[in-house]
Amino acid sequence: MANMAITVEPGIYISPNSNCDKKWWGIAVRIEDDILITKDGYELLSKYAPRKVKKLKKWLQKKCFK
């Protein structure tokens, strides 16, 4: 279906009383990508979003976020 946009958002959610170290209880992490379906394949619209902690911290230090 060309010209359709979809979001792919895998995530992990650790509920209280989970069978893991208590320090992880209540944590939620989601990585979201937006994809445009084209007639020849797809285009990853979120390709420039920071994906590593170091790059994310640098991005958040930009003047427009202060």
Image (cartoon, grey):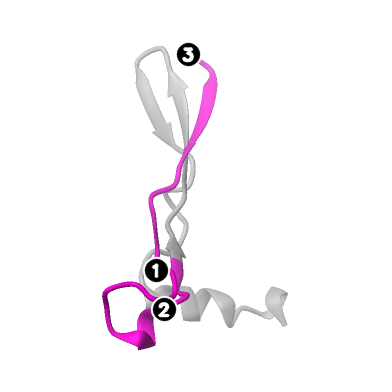
Q: Are there few (<14), some (14-19), or many (20+) residues within 10 Å of tag 1? A: some
Distance in Å between CA atoms under marks 1 and 2: 5 Å
Q: Earlier in the sequence, mark 1 or mark 2?
A: 1
Of tags 3 and 1, the one toward the viewer is 1
Tell me which corner region of the image, top left, top right, bottom left or bottom right, holds residue 19: bottom left
Q: Position of residue 35 (x, y in %)?
A: 46, 34
SS assignment at label 2: loop
Above or below for 22 versus 50? below
Which residue bears the numbered disc 1? 14
Q: 8 or 22, which is in the foreground?
A: 22
What amino acid type should be assigned to the residue bearing mark 2? Trp
In the depicted structure, whether residue 36 falls above or below residue 45: above
Look at the image and give the residue range highlighted in magenta.
1-28
Point out which mark residue 25 bears: 2
Amino acid on which disc 3 is placed: Ala
For label 3, the residue is 2
